[in-house]
Image (cartoon, rainbow, N blue to C red):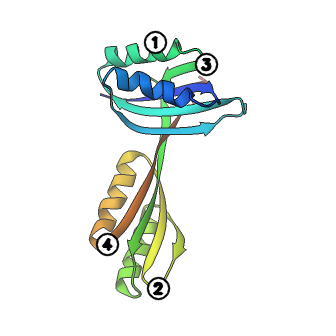
Amino acid sequence: MRHTLSIIVADQPGELSRIVGLFSARGFNIETLSVGSTLDPEWSRVTIVTSGDDRTVEQIVKQCERLARVREVRDVTSQPHVEREMALIDVSATPGANRQEVLSLVSVFRAKVVDISHTRMLIEASGNREKVDAFIEMLRPLGINDITRSGYIAINRVSNEEQ
């Protein structure tokens, strides 16, 4: 099963390496990894997507919690949460019908054109994995030149706190 882990770690050199090393030493693959600052500049949020059964992931969570400069570890998969990924897609878009088709798909998927030339467009798309994958598959026949994906970020839903 796929799990999304949110880890609050000290924003210091080597901390990410220690977390990744823990996964590597136990033979667990990291599907995506994203790191960003938090409201407190001394801490960063590491979001890791991995696969494994619940018991195995629970073990990883406990081992991460034992790391010296880790403040909090959550398996957000077990709670209602919002998960997003961003992709930058370089697609062929020659003037005429081809460009119009790309623009139509951009509109349908609520994506955004962030750069354009006479023959290509750079498109930003965000959403859950299924939405980003579906958008890429729709663009593929038009000619994708390159793709960069950010990896996931996740946060617990706020609507659950108010109940």
Q: Indicate the secondary structure of the residue bearing disc 1.
A: helix
Left or right: residue 153 versus residue 27 is: right
Looking at marks 4 and 1 on the same chain, the residue that comes earlier in the sequence is marked by 1
Cα–Cα span, label 3 and label 4: 45 Å
Tell me which numbered mark, 3 or 2, is placed earlier along the sequence: 3
- Real-space Cα distance between discs 4 and 1? 45 Å
Q: Which residue is depicted at the point 43% across and 63% down?
A: 89
The one nearer the camera, 127 or 14, is 14
The residue type indicated by label 3 comes to: Arg
Q: Is residue 115 above or below residue 155?
A: below
Q: CA distance from mark 3 to mark 2?
A: 50 Å
Chain-order first, disc 1 or disc 2: 1
Q: Which residue is mark 4?
A: 143
* Residue at 39% in and 13% down: 59
Marks 1 and 2, Cα distance to the nearest angstrom? 53 Å
Left or right side of 4 for 15: right
Q: Which residue is mark 3?
A: 69
